[in-house]
Each structure stands twice: as structure tokens, then as C-alpha cells.
Amino acid sequence: MFEKCQWFTPDLTLVLHDYGTSILFAHGTGSIHEALDHVAWPVHLQVQPDALDEVRRHATVTNEKHMQRMTLESRTPTSVDPRARRLTSADADALTKLYQDGEATGESPDFFYSSMVTDGVFFGVYEDQELTAVAGTHLVARDESAAAIGNVYVRRDRRSRGLGRTVTAAVVNELRDLETIGLNVRADNRSAIHVYESLGFATHCDFREALAARAL
């Protein structure tokens, strides 16, 4: 994992280079300008509000979202629904089709690459040969005992049936031996937050997610 990272001081600022893009993480403002000199544009942002204000001084910021970062705090085993099955590269087309269901409402994951399925952990539920729910990972770094859960989506006509919890529980169960398991969720998505809390996650911090493009 860390060979694809660049750290900048004095603040905790990190640029992750992977999947042909860059992600900038920042908890302070002192290293923002330097970090922006080492990104591939456009850059995905996961930063604190003061850091976002500093990015605006050097770049054009769009798609801002108020997010919560949650980490797994309870290690109590969770039963896994047998409907949740491990996905492979053979499921890539079904995943793409499922995520397209949320494009019109802006709900589809905006950071998914098919290589994540083989590099990480994805579980899904098929109903009538259609993939209707999925949860996966953005990254799994077993050498660092850490993983980030993401790309969670339930088809709009199959919600409120517990499918989101089913697939997320399966991913958590697969990763439970890791020291750090985190995920990001929109701060206004109370139903998803409730599901994650029921699986043992607790809020770690608030932050802002956005996309930055080089200023003209």
C-alpha cells in the first residue's frame, strides 16, 4: 500500500496514487500547496473543512459532500446470510449494471474500478439471476492490517429489505481479523449509518469529500 503513497509535513497530508487517479487526505492546511504539486488531476479529496478551504485557493472544487468516517469498534461475530456470495471478475458486468441503477439519482459509487473486485473483497446478492445488492472494498492492505469498505449499493426497487446489511456483514466477516476496518458514508444517510452501527461501526470523524481540478 505505502509504496503508492506520498506523505507531506508538517500536517498529516497524504496523496494516494492508485487506479490511475490521486486521492488527497488532509487534516491540516500547511502541506496542501506542496501536495497539490504531486497529484494527477483531477484529484479526489477527503479532507477536513479548513483543508478544503485551502484547496479552493489553488484549485476548482466541485461535488462537495459532507461525510462521516466510521471504524469497526466491536469485534462481536455477526451471522452471515447465505444469500451473500463472494464476487469475482466474472461478476464485473453485473456490478456495472447494478451501479448504473443509481446514476440518475447520483447514488451510484463514484470510485469503482473492475480491478477492485479481484484485488479486494466483494460480496453480492443475486435475485432471479440479477445482482441486486453489493458491498466491497476500496482497498485491502493485509500487510498493514487495514481495509476500507466501499462501493456499497442496493438496487432502488430492492431497498428496505436488509440487503445492504447482508452484503456488508459478509465483507466485514471476511476482513474481521484486520486491525483497522473503516468506511465512509454521507452524513445525511441515516439509514446506512444505522446499518453500520448495528455491525459494530462507530463514527471516527466528519470530513468533506470533493473533486478538485487544476485552476485555469
Image (cartoon, rainbow, N blue to C red):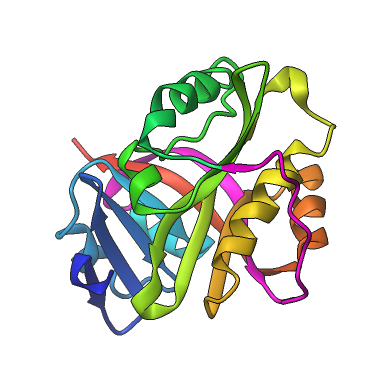
Q: Residue furthest bottom?
A: 10
Closer to us: 216 or 163: 163
Picture layout, residue 144 above or below residue 60:
below
Quarter of image, res 126: top right
Q: Residue, x 28% and y 73% (percent of image)?
A: 31
Quarter of image, res 85: top right
Q: Residue, x 71% and y 21% (percent of image)?
A: 156
Closer to us: 10 or 116: 116
Which contiguous range is marked in magenta?
56-85
Q: Position of residue 81 (x, y in %)?
A: 75, 47
Q: Residue, x 22% and y 58% (percent of image)?
A: 36
Instruction: Give yes or no for residue 90 being in the magenta stretch.
Output: no
Closer to us: 167 or 45: 167
Q: Is residue 67 visible?
A: no
Q: Residue furthest front?
A: 82
Quarter of image, res 169: bottom right
Instruction: Give yes or no for residue 61 being in the magenta stretch.
Output: yes
Q: Residue, x 81% and y 39% (percent of image)?
A: 162
Q: Quadrant of the C terminus?
A: top left
Q: Is residue 31 visible?
A: yes
Number of on-image labels: 0
Q: Position of residue 144 (x, y in %)?
A: 38, 79
